[in-house]
Amino acid sequence: MRNLLGFLSGLIFGLGLIVSGMANPAKVLNFLDLAGHWDPSLGFVMGGAVVVTFLGYRLAWQQGAPILAPDFDVPTSSRIDRPLILGAALFGLGWGIGGFCPGPAWTALPLLSPGILTFLPMMLLGLWLGAGGRNLPLLISKGVRK
């Protein structure tokens, strides 16, 4: 049941990315191009996501525990350290240069464009290297954890 709900959540997320145009890296790059052909639509998508996330967390925290888990998996550290800053900077640079972040990269894979065929393997390599060379399929399915 948990896998089915995970699949459905990912499918809805992916469809939302496609419908909003976020699978198109030109849309992202045009949002970042303030001096050129600026496209503010990404800001509206992000704003909508913030509202939905805010409301979703308020509803989730009212529950005693998640439906399919014994408790919420909440980070225990709130430290802002060097790995966090470097990771955020690398993510931002990659996003600004390529126009992709992980979710839209997977939804754009069927297009087989040269950009996505370069970005996606490099993203997976970065995940693997960041985890010290551990099991990549596990990293993709569970997220990077040390």
Image: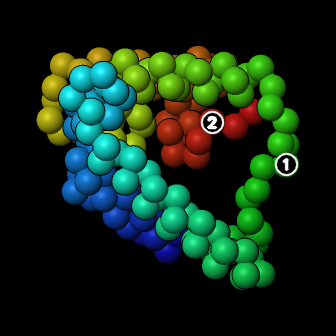
- The amino acid type of the residue labelled 2 equals Val
| Residue 23 horizontal/vertical position (percent) | 26, 42
Compared across the picture, whether 89 is left or right of 109 comes to right
Drawn side of residue 98 relative to residue 74, left or right: left
- Residue 13 relative to residue 23: left or right: right
Along the line of sight, which residue is nearer the eye, 106 or 21? 21
Viewer-nearest residue: 83 or 66 = 83
Q: Position of residue 122 (x, y in %)?
A: 41, 18
Residue at image x 40%, y 23%? 96
Q: Position of residue 41 (x, y in %)?
A: 29, 48
Q: Quadrant of the C terminus?
A: top right
Q: Which residue is mark 2?
A: 144
Percent coordinates x, y for residue 117 in the rendering? 25, 22
Q: Residue furthest front?
A: 35
Q: Nearer the viewer, residue 51 or 110?
A: 51
First in sequence: mark 2 vs mark 1: 1
Q: Residues within 10 Å of mark 1 (few under 14, many from 20)?
A: few
Give the crowd class for mark 2: few <14, some 14-19, many >=20 residues within 10 Å: some
Observer able to see residue 66: yes
**Image quadrant in which you'd find residue 14:** bottom left
Q: Residue at x 32, y 34 (%)?
A: 31
Name the residue beneath numbered marker 1.
Answer: 76
Quadrant of res 11? bottom left
Q: Is residue 2 above or below residue 89?
A: below
Left or right relative to 75: residue 140:
left
Query: Disc 1 marks which amino acid?
Result: Thr
Evaluate if marks 2 and 1 touch, with contact meaning CB atoms under 8 Å apart.
Answer: no
**In this orientation, does residue 128 appear?**
no
Q: CA distance from mark 2 to mark 1?
A: 15 Å
Image coloring type: rainbow
Q: Residue at x 34, y 64 (%)?
A: 12
